Image (cartoon, helix red, strand yellow):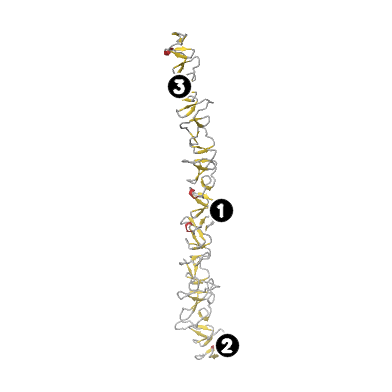
Amino acid sequence: MCEATTWGNSVTRTCINNPVTSCPPGTWADNFTNLCTSSCSSNSSNGQLFYGENITRLCLAVCPSPSFAYSLTLVCIDICPITVINSPGYFGDPGTTPTRLCVTTCLTTGLYRDTANSRTCGTTCTFNSTYKTYRDPTTMTCVAECPSFPQYLYAQGTNSTNAQCVSTCTTGYMYDANMSCIANCPGLLDPTTNKCVQQCPYDSNSNTYLYANMVSKVCVIASGCPTNTYASDDLLICTSTCPNNTYIYQKNCVAFCPNGYYINLNNQSCVTASGCPTSYFANNQTLTCVANCTNGTFGDALTRMCLTQCYGTNYADPSTGLCSSSCSIGLIKNTALLTCVGNCSNGYFYNPLQSSCTTSCTSPYYANTATSSCVTMCTANPMTFASLTPARACVTTCPSSTQWFDLVNRVCTSNCPTGTYQYSLNVSCVAFCPPPYYKLSTACVLNCSSSSYYADDTTRTCVSTCPSGYFRDPTTYKCV
């Protein structure tokens, strides 16, 4: 056995004092056996392991930095090996004592296995422009992609100090599609989930779509769109111009304007009738603002609507398509229907006092159905007569209260004018009573007997005294 501080070389069968130059390759100087050995001995008194160190070629209890003790081969190595099947392998833990060990799981609290950093355990992970890894607290490993099982973890951080896998992104960070927490989304931010998205989603909580605010790059509800932009369901963005066939309503682009609103094609918006452009009217048939009302409707300047019936003192003028206080030249007012017409229709009469069509005529006029006009003298062909009852009208038969036809003035009268007589045969007032009638007071009669008068055939008059040369015949009540 070699003396202390010397070691036996089994190849040369000599005791050597410089293991660096004299121990065979793959052997180390073992102070327990005083031999150059391929496997260092352990301390039999306390079981402490010793490891072959390649620089001093000694078996040491503590491997010098930066090497680590590899217990499987009892050697000091600079980079721990990958030897474990289905495992990341071994990593150098700088915190173990009495020596720095190669371990499969970092034994020092708070250290992570970092494959890129010479397979060592460290408080931070490799993070540079070419290779970025994150601290995974579930496996205490530095990973390029955070795990999705047993829970989703997200990669967060911008340097080796803060790069880590987290279950929830911290304030100021958003989830992106690559399972990372980032400070700025490359596309859009959905604030309801704090996730980065390419297109804004439907928000089931508020029961509405979200829209891309292209200024802030954030998904917002319609009211959150910037000034002069509007939420488009077709594009899912806030846009200054709504897509074709959609219209601005409040902060939305809509396919149909709501009840009470009309499409203003000038600026592609929904407006109330008062919001239609100047000289335009709201058309309930087309639900648009139009310059000219159509299909029997007329523009009303007060309500700004196309109306089927004008009101108040305005008349529907077909020449202008407007409700106006006066009618166009050549047209007259129908006051009952509030329309402008060329001629008064059946049941209406042109009143020259009002230049309008009315259902009745006022003094001094009478309603003439033959001409649909109000006249001061009823027509002679056909023969009609002015009657005050039941309305001021030209009639062919006078009412019982004024049953006599005044042929001269063409009026119905209760008493014939002076110089005329009531002729019952045709209920008219006549200047002369035709045979066989005689004048008696104001009437024409067939005989004069009932009045104690005698019929004078020479004058066709009932007289109390026969003319000279004639005598009263009491049997016939005639002058004979």
Considering only order in the chain, which callout, 2 or 3, is on the residue closer to the N terminus?
Answer: 2
The residue to which callout 2 is attached is 11
The residue to which callout 3 is attached is 418
Whether residue 256 is visible here, answered yes or no, is: no
Whether residue 121 is visible here, answered yes or no, is: yes
**Residue drawn at (54%, 35%) of the image:** 343
Which labelled disc corresponds to residue 244? 1
Q: Is residue 343 above or below residue 222?
A: above
Residue 451: x and y in percent read: 42, 14
Q: Is residue 479 left or right of residue 10?
A: left
Which labelled disc corresponds to residue 347? none
Most extreme residue toward the front is 468
Q: Is residue 135 above or below residue 363?
A: below
- Disc 1 crowd rating (10 Å Cα; few below 14, some 14-19, many 20+) is few
Determine whether the residue tagged by mark 2 lies in a helix, strand or loop: loop
**Residue drawn at (48%, 25%) of the image:** 411
What amino acid is at disc 1?
Asn
Considering only order in the chain, which callout, 2 or 1, is on the residue closer to the N terminus?
Answer: 2
Q: Between residues 87 and 190, which one lies in front from this camera angle?
A: 190
Residue 148: x and y in percent read: 50, 65
Considering only order in the chain, which callout, 3 or 1, is on the residue closer to the N terminus?
Answer: 1
Q: From the viewer's perspective, is the residue at label 1 or at label 3 nearer?
A: 3
Determine whether the residue tagged by mark 3 lies in a helix, strand or loop: loop
Q: CA distance from mark 1 to mark 2?
A: 95 Å
Q: From the viewer's perspective, is the residue at label 1 or at label 2 nearer?
A: 1
Q: From the viewer's perspective, is the residue at label 3 or at label 2 nearer?
A: 3
Q: CA distance from mark 3 to mark 2?
A: 178 Å
What amino acid is at disc 3?
Thr
Q: Is residue 424 above or below residue 28?
A: above
What amino acid is at disc 2?
Val
**Residue drawn at (57%, 85%) of the image:** 25
